[in-house]
Amino acid sequence: MRALKAGTVVLLFMAFALSACTRDEEPHRPDDEVQRRDQALVAVVQCLVDHDRIPDAHLRDQPWLVRDKVRGSAELVEWLSSHRDTVYEGKTLQAWEDEATAGWPGWRCPL
Amino acid sequence: MGDFVGVDPENLKELTKRLEQLHELLARHSPLIQQKMQKWGSEVAVTSLPGLIAAALDDVRDMDARTTRAYELAREQGWSVLSRAPGLPGLAFDRPPSVRLDWEATGQSGNQGKRDAETLAAALAAKNPEEARTALLGLPESLQRHLADEDYQAAFWAGAGPLALRAARALYERTGSALFSAESVSVLRALGASLAAAGQMRVGTGKDRRPLLPDATRAALAANSDPWSVGMLVKYGPEGRSWDSRLLADLTRAMLDARAAGKTIWPPARGPLETDADASRHQRLMAEYDAVGAVLQRAAENGMAARHALGDQATGLKYARMLVSDSWHTPGYDPGPFLSSYAHPGGVLPPTGQVDLSAPTAAFLKAAVSAERGTSADAKESAWSVVHIVQATAEFSKLHPQTVLPIQIRQALTYTIERYLPDFAKSVGHDFTAQPLPKENDPANPWTVVVRNSELEAMLAQALRAPEDFGRLKGTLNARVAVAVAATIKDPSDADYLSEIAGLYGMVQRLQNDRHFADEQLRDEEETRNQTALAILAGGFGALSFSNPWGPGTIAQFLTGGSAPVVNESFDTDHALRALKDNADAFRKQVLQIEVPVVRGLIASGALHPPRDASWYTNGRLTPNAEFVEWLSDHAETSYGGRTLLQWIRAAQEAMRMQQ
């Protein structure tokens, strides 16, 4: 039993070492950041929508907003593109997104 | 009906010939006649002349149909061209007897179409190229004469239908160097032209409006039981714009499906390939008579056809996957059987002798993304094509990480990137499912695309291989700063086009860093970058003007912006810029790369009016010189379009961050 446990520990260790190894070998992969950025953008816009901090005119006929629920999509990226420099609650939308991405997944809506 | 008259076939033939000559003469001189009559102030209405000339052609066709029928009737009565004259040795030409024919009915060219179809069917059914050729001698001329004749076209294709689509297989030569004789080529040419013309025709009105080509013919085109033969009609048929775009798109799909299903798309092999030279020659023959390539080429020339095929939301991706591939070459052959048993003891060797066929594929891909930017359905299909091409390229790279696509296909990818540069710049940083959408999600605005960050990166990695590839794209991005500055000022929304370019620039730079080019190669990269920026800025780029308010038109102009100019050597003729080019590297780097495009952008947006007496700005052209540098330093803190000149330059420098 003891031997079995030791064996499991060794196997686990090897698995860790192996996964660490493959991660190290990968060239520069910004995919992780891109995934976090996607989730952060949805959370930031949802936060601003929930607290009514985006003027209605900015949200009119936006296909990514259905019953006050923000849907992550190419259309949301298009909207972001035309509001990158818009200031909501003292910060540009781009600054909001950058901050939330940096803190992801721990970021919480500060409003 | 029933208006029977007696005619002498020989005289009728002569009459037809003279009518035809008269028509030709009138048609040739019609512009001159109109011009002269107008010049002399003639009161005769000459505007109806083209209509009269067209009517004359109809008369020629009718008379031609009657002549053919008259000779047929004469033959039915036992007459033959050559006969044995009594008392004389050998054969003599015999004049046909008078016959009675239904003047009205036989005058309709539909009859001629029907008879031509019968001739074709009989000739092709004989399966003897010699006989077929003789029987078909008169066909090309008749087809050519009736190209715009709907009655004829309807009757001909209803009669000849699917059989005509297989003409190439019946006509090819079994031996000799050329696959088709001159006569066969003229038959294929005429059939191709007729198919293209008929494909554009519609019959009926309102709800009943439908293609003139019979369903059976259209079905045969789609089912494509003999894709090679159909491809030959397209190869010898007219240029792509003479075809109906939907028909060509259907044909493209049918050809690509046939190719994917392993159907016979190559010309028939003629006899056994006994030597290495035979096998190699056959590969070249395959390349010359490449059916799929012929159809792709015509669809590319047509433009819209390529966009119908790749821009279809449901099926476009499937065909983009087939096109973005390294399989565009002849199959090659196993050289084993031609080697001595000493050199090659047996087994199958990798194929050799493959001929590259990626040119039409690349032309097709380019055409698929080349609709004018705007709000049209064509622009939407073009946007979908971009989405599908990016996705297909990413998938290809994932499946074949080690494979580099053929150079021509990679060039088509670069072309796509340059044409949709602002769209790709906007897409950097996010990975939601790609899709076309109108700018700002407003249906009144031009179509743009948002693609996935991961797929864009894979596409860039495929397209950019050599240091020069990177340099060229970065030079284009440099030049693009001018448009980005102008658009940021003009666009009333809070878009920041400079920061979007910065994102794309960063992605390109990261990919370049991953490649670890040697110092010498990096100098090539920098040289190409400077030349590209210089060529675009010194080219037609100064003509760009954003004088109108921001709206669909200006947006389309912004989207098209820096993509149009292609690097060429023409900028060398501009002495000022040549002097600048010969100048110190540092000066070029500082002034040319950032300040020039920024100031150009400010001028284009109307935010900056250059001083009247400026030596560096004449006739809408900015030519940097010492005075320009002085002006820059004097105005660093002057505000233009909401930012100081220095802030604009800083923002642009950030966008182009020189992170070597």
Image (cartoon, rainbow, N blue to C red):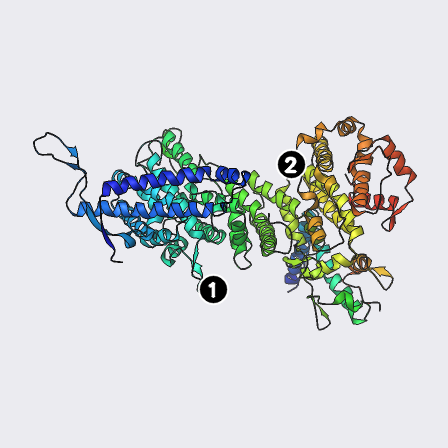
Q: Residues within 10 Å of mark 2 (few under 14, many from 20)?
A: some
Closer to us: B128 or B266: B128
- Judged from the image, the secondary structure of the residue bearing numbered disc 1 is helix
Marks 1 and 2: in contact by CB < 8 Å? no
Instruction: Kindly identify which chain the residue marked by label 1 belongs to.
Output: B
Q: Tell whether B1 sits left or right of B481.
A: left
Closer to us: B308 or A43: B308
* Residue B95 position in % (x across, y down): 18, 38
Q: Which quadrant is the N terminus of chain A positioned in?
A: bottom right
Write down the quadrant of residue B384 in the picture. Answer: bottom right
Badge 2 amino acid: Ala
Q: Tell whether B370 sits left or right of A35.
A: left
Q: Exactly how many numbered labels are in the figure?
A: 2
**Can the viewer see residue B54 in this picture?**
yes
Q: Tell whether B474 sits left or right of B370.
A: right
Q: Residue furthest left?
A: B87
Q: Which residue is mark 1?
A: B206
Badge 1 amino acid: Gly
Residue B310 in the image: above or below residue B517 = below
Residue B485 in the image: above or below residue A97 = above
Cα separation between marks 2 and 1: 56 Å
Q: Which residue is mark 2?
A: B466
- Residue drawn 76% across the image and 63% down it: A105
* Residue B157 position in % (x across, y down): 35, 52
Instruction: Kindly identify which chain the residue marked by label 2 belongs to.
Output: B
Closer to us: B251 or B353: B251
Q: Residues within 10 Å of mark 1 (few under 14, many from 20)?
A: few
- Residue drawn 72% across the image and 54% down it: B429
Q: Which mark is residue B260?
A: none
**Can the viewer see residue B228 in this picture?**
no
